[in-house]
Amino acid sequence: MRALIFAAMICVAPLAVSAQSAVDRLFDAAGLPELIASFADDSRLGARDLDDSFLQGQGGDVFAETIDRLHDPARLIETMRAGVSDRLDPDDAAQALSFVESEMGQRIARLEVEARQAMSNDDVEAAALAAADRADDAVVAMIELRNLPERNADISFNAQVAFWAGVAATAPDFDVPDIEGQRDAIAARSRTWVTGFYMLVASALEDGDLETYSAFWDTEVAEAWDDAVSAALEEMYSELSFATGQAVGRLLPQNEL
């Protein structure tokens, strides 16, 4: 019943915004530029570590500069913005804005950005992941409603596949591993990370906020928003991983023979 009432409320929201403006406003109001910037920083640091694990520390400035260019936050933000715009109906975006631009919506968006930034710290991330084992029922229900553990697991797994495809594209003699056996481990890590992340967000919410937030996600427009963001993120991350794999493959020691 609450979801039906909430859906009715957002359906009567004014739609006096242009198609592109609605999607851009929603993208920005939800904090996606800041979230992607945090992702880019973490991913860049992880990719730089590939120099030691694959290139025997010989990647040098060429590899470092390539990784920095690929992980440029401004580039990834605009890639994501275009990907979401291609997938999200402007009318759905305009209706979702009624919640996301509300006082509560903006407060939650800020908390999500702050939580994502905080989890770049190893100690904070470890505490959040530990909290996943004692997650509140309301947190678990919300992430299950949005299918977030499975969405994130698929995105992570497909990014791994894309990375190895990139390596194979520039180092065809490299023995690319079969990562299908890693699917369950990736799924488990994704579930723990998503649960820990939202436990961190929920720890700063007021009474009743999580229930209202879940009611928003239990609407067709919110589902369309989630679908568009997830699909755009998967495309962006897979392309980034493939390009990173290509950079590794070009500089593999065996390719210098």
Image (spheres, grey):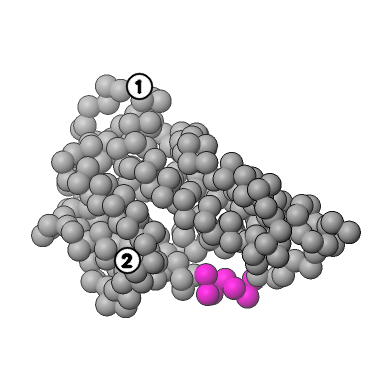
Amino acid found under the numbered disc labelled 1: Ser
Assess disc 2: are there few (<14), some (14-19) or many (≥20) residues with their C-alpha within 10 Å of its C-alpha: some
Q: CA distance from mark 1 to mark 2?
A: 40 Å
Marks counted in the figure total: 2
Which badge, 1 or 2, is on the more N-terminal residue?
A: 1
- Quadrant of res 29: top left
In the picture shown, does residue 232 fall above or below 138?
above
Which residue in the structure is indicated by mark 2? 124
Relative to 50, 155 lies left or right: left
Which residue in the structure is indicated by mark 1? 18
Q: Residue at x 35, y 21 (%)?
A: 18
Q: Residue at x 76, y 52 (%)?
A: 250
In the picture shown, does residue 238 fall above or below 126?
above
Amino acid found under the numbered disc labelled 2: Val
Is there any visible trace of residue 17 in the rendered image?
yes
Circle 1: element type: loop
Circle 2: element type: helix
Assess disc 1: are there few (<14), some (14-19) or many (≥20) residues with their C-alpha within 10 Å of its C-alpha: few
Q: Are marks 1 and 2 in contact (CB under 8 Å)?
A: no
Q: Nearer the viewer, mark 1 or mark 2?
A: 2
- Quadrant of res 149: bottom left
Relative to 154, 218 lies left or right: left
Dominant SS type (magenta): helix
In the picture shown, does residue 256 fall above or below 34?
below
Span colored in magenta: 180-186
Q: Position of residue 211 (x, y in %)?
A: 18, 58
